[in-house]
Amino acid sequence: MLHQTMYSCVPSPFYERRYERFSVAHAGTVTSVRPGLGGVSVRPCRMIDISRGGASFAVDTTIGLSQHYYLHIIGTPLRIGCAEVYRNGERIGVQFIKPIEQTLLREIIRQDFFTGQNGKAAKSR
């Protein structure tokens, strides 16, 4: 860089991601335990993107949603443990407690590609 500043040399996790993210449009569910072990809350969500280490999705409302829950992506056999990183309106970003396997990530992306849910599939003429 010709014109460096002191800030251009500082590493930032905002610009450097550990895992590559993929846009998806899968349906899913978020399962959380209510306070005081007062039952289980299950609500639908719509996936926005996913990587091996985390995901973002949208829910109808975040009222009563804890910061740790299980994410189930419809069409996959697993429930993935999540810790919330951010909330921005109805959009939630999470980090997975344990990174998911590369084969599961490929399966999710392939399902989205073949069903054409993410809007990137070629439009018929």
Image (cartoon, grey):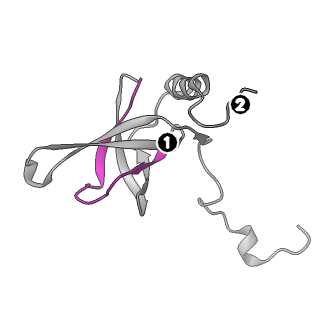
Badge 2 crowding class, 10 Å Cα cut-off, few under 14, some 14 to 19, many 20 or more, is few
Q: Which residue lies furthest to the right in this view?
A: 2
Judge by depth and name the residue closer to the eye, 59 or 105: 59
Provide the secondary structure element on which disc 2 rests.
Answer: loop
Q: From mark 1 to mark 2, how far is it between C-alphas?
A: 31 Å
* Residue marked by disc 1: 53
**Which quadrant does the C terminus fall into?**
top right
Q: Where is residue 70 in the image (x, y as percent from the top left)?
A: 30, 40
Q: In this view, does 63 lie above or below 68?
A: below
Q: Using the image, tell me which numbered label, if any, was put on residue 123.
A: 2
The amino acid type, in three-letter code, at marker 1 is Gly
Tell me which segment is drawn in magenta.
55-75
Residue at position x 10%, y 44% in the image:
39
Q: Which of marks 1 and 2 is nearer the N terminus?
A: 1
C-beta proximity under 8 Å, tags 1 and 2:
no
Is 125 inside the magenta-drawn segment? no
